[in-house]
Image (cartoon, rainbow, N blue to C red):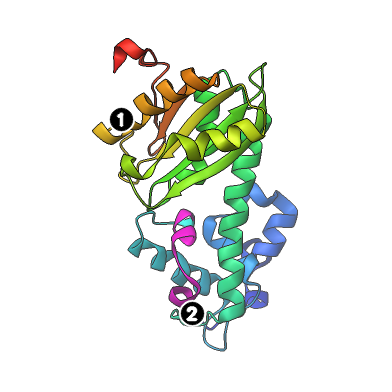
Amino acid sequence: MNHIKIKELPAEQRPYEKCISMGASALTDNELLAIILRSGTKDLNSLHLADIVLSATGKTAFPGLQGLYHMSVRQLMELPGIGKVKAVQLLCIGELSRRMASSSAKNALCMADAASIAEYFMERLRHEEQEHLYSLMLDAKNRYLGEQLITRGTGNSTLVSPREIYIEALRRQALGVVLIHNHPSGDPSPSDYDIDVTERMFVSGEMIGIPLMDHIIIGDQEYFSFREQGLLNTDDF
């Protein structure tokens, strides 16, 4: 089977023909990857090559297509039949999928709704293996003004200062700020560090006149919102 060329398979088993006759949604993950890879090798057709790639993602924290986002060019090139060009194509497919999911969520983004904001950042952050802290800046009507990556790779609140967040908020004439960061563990429950950051940013925002509207922690398909939990008052800290 591995040595059989795709064109030698029955028409209903060929990914291209199946996509044309039944639509892309009818394709399996294996078949979708086979089309992206386009060709196999002398000994492996593109369907078997796709099998090898999907099996390799089992060594990541996210087996399956999501695992492509967690593999490097070097790791992919270690697989039989995957050269630099195919490795780059696979990584770009993973990144393209992530951006499409983020873009779709942004179209429905409501800045006054923690669930909507969490959905917007979910695909971007839930697979990250390090913590990322973003500030989201809003205008007087809670509309999106922009966002800024504040820190990456640390959960230590002492490395996050109000100055970093509010200088950019002042520059953009923001009238509200939302903090968003992820927990690589997948559990969005706030740590002592998270509570400390929220307290300092809340107090600083009140003094500057740019209130902290929320602090949202992204887990794996779940989130924690300080505002939804009623934890954005000075008496709460």
Residue segment shown in magenta: 66-76
Give the number of the mark in front: 2 or 1.
Answer: 1
Name the residue beneath numbered marker 2: 77
Q: Quadrant of residue 45?
A: bottom right
Furthest residue to the bottom? 42
In the rendered image, residue 115, in percent from the top left (x then y), is placed at: 50, 24
Viewer-nearest residue: 128 or 92: 128
Q: Is residue 41 above or below residue 176?
A: below
Residue 73 is covered by the magenta coloring = yes
* Residue appearing at x 39%, y 31% in the figure: 222
The mark that comes first in sequence, 2 or 1, is 2
Q: Which mark is residue 196?
A: 1
Q: Is residue 108 above or below residue 66?
A: above
Q: Is residue 209 above or below residue 11?
A: above
- Secondary structure that dominates the magenta span: helix
Label 2 amino acid? Met
In the rendered image, residue 220, in percent from the top left (x then y), is placed at: 38, 39
SS for tag 1? Answer: helix
Label 1 amino acid? Asp
